[in-house]
């Protein structure tokens, strides 16, 4: 089960890299805000996943 959370962490890290490298040129203010929101939500998700993995490993080792 730990393997699944590690995969989720990797996918989220890739999403953050992608969103962080996207250009905002030509986007409306609303589109930029949506992109920023997705970026920061992905960062929060990554923190949560790592916290779960590191502090509650027994849950993922079943």
Image (cartoon, helix red, strand yellow):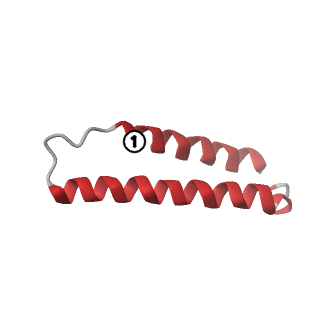
Q: Position of residue 36 (x, y in %)?
A: 34, 55
Q: Position of residue 54 (x, y in %)?
A: 78, 56
Q: What residue lies at 61% left-to-right and 48% top-to-bottom?
A: 8
Q: Is residue 55 left or right of residue 39?
A: right
Corner quadrant of residue 58: bottom right
Q: Is residue 9 left or right of residue 60?
A: left
Other residues around mark 1 within 10 Å, as few (<14) / some (14–19) / many (≥20): few
Q: What residue lies at 46% left-to-right and 38% top-to-bottom?
A: 17
Corner quadrant of residue 21: top left
Q: What residue lies at 72% left-to-right and 61% top-to-bottom?
A: 52
Q: What residue lies at 58% left-to-right and 53% top-to-bottom?
A: 46
Q: Is residue 30 left or right of residue 13?
A: left
Dot 1 corresponds to which residue?
20
Number of callouts in the render?
A: 1
- Mark 1 element type: helix
5 is higher (above) or lower (below) than 26: below
**Which quarter of the image is occupied by the C terminus?**
bottom right
Q: Is residue 61 left or right of residue 44?
A: right
Q: Position of residue 50 (x, y in %)?
A: 68, 54
61 is higher (above) or lower (below) than 21: below
């Amino acid at each position: 089960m730990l393997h699944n959370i590690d995969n989720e962490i990797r996918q989220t890290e890739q999403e953050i890299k992608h969103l962080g490298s996207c250009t905002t040129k030509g986007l409306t203010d609303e589109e930029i805000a949506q992109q920023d929101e997705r970026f920061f939500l992905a960062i929060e998700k990554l923190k949560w996943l790592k916290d779960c993995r590191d502090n509650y490993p027994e849950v993922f080792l079943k």
